[in-house]
Image: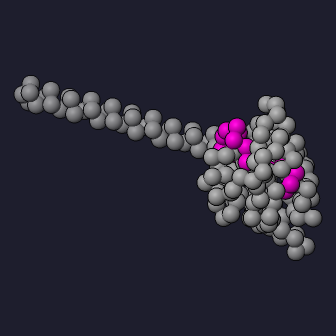
Amino acid sequence: MSSENHNSTSKFGTAMFILAWIAGLGLVSVLFEESLMAQFNPNEAPESRYENGRPTVVLKRNRYGHYVATGLINQQEVVFLVDTGATNVSIPANIAEQLNLKPGAPARSQTANGTVTVYRTQIPSLQIGNILLSNVSGNINPGMEGPEILLGMSVLKQLEFTQREDILTIRPL
């Protein structure tokens, strides 16, 4: 084999080796990200069933001690974080815009970061698993960042919930 062919084969082999490493790292990265998402939101498809004719949803607590679940607002997928300290459902402004929720009257709201101005809104349709609620009070919070919507007492007061160990079971009252 000539030296020119050997160099060509060697460069091709090196390039393939590098590409294989890049592909391997990409795959590991994707798997790691999926694992982190599952740890953050173990309820991407909440367990739903009917008990005595009532819709019932079972949520698992995430590794950080929170109940996070995928649900729907106006038939659009969202991520909820159950927050018994929130008076209303609290929606980041950028998500509210995507959901076509219109800001109403301004109001002052006490948050962990202090007092903020929010805008009242009415949520026509909110669903977690097989539980569907209509005309829920909410707040659009322009200062709130992140992909989660706080599921506050304007929803939770319409539900019966039972917590046992790391499981939260909810059903309509």
Q: Nearer the viewer, residue 125 or 4?
A: 125
Q: Residue at x 40, y 39 (%)?
A: 23
Q: Residue at x 73, y 43 (%)?
A: 141
Left or right of 90? Residue 21 is left
Occupied quadrant, residue 14: top left
Q: Residue furthest top?
A: 3
Left or right of 173? Residue 111 is left
| 35 vs 172: above or below | above
Give the magenta part as a residue range: 140-155
User: Residue 133: image x %, image y %?
Assistant: 80, 65
Viewport quadrant of the C terminus:
bottom right
Residue 150 visible to the viewer: no
User: Residue 112: image x %, image y %?
Assistant: 82, 33
Q: Residue furthest front?
A: 105
Q: Residue at x 78, y 36 (%)?
A: 116
Viewport quadrant of the N terminus:
top left
Left or right of 107? Residue 15 is left
| 114 vs 35: above or below | above
Is residue 58 one of those drawn in magenta? no
Number of numbered discs: 0
Q: Residue at x 63, y 52 (%)?
A: 97
Left or right of 125? Residue 160 is right
Q: Residue furthest bottom?
A: 53
| 96 vs 114: above or below | below
Is residue 144 one of those drawn in magenta? yes
Occupied quadrant, residue 136: bottom right
Q: Nearer the viewer, residue 34 or 143?
A: 143
Residue 3 visible to the viewer: yes
- The colour scheme of the drawn protein is one colour
User: Residue 152: image x %, image y %?
Assistant: 83, 49
Q: Residue furthest left?
A: 2
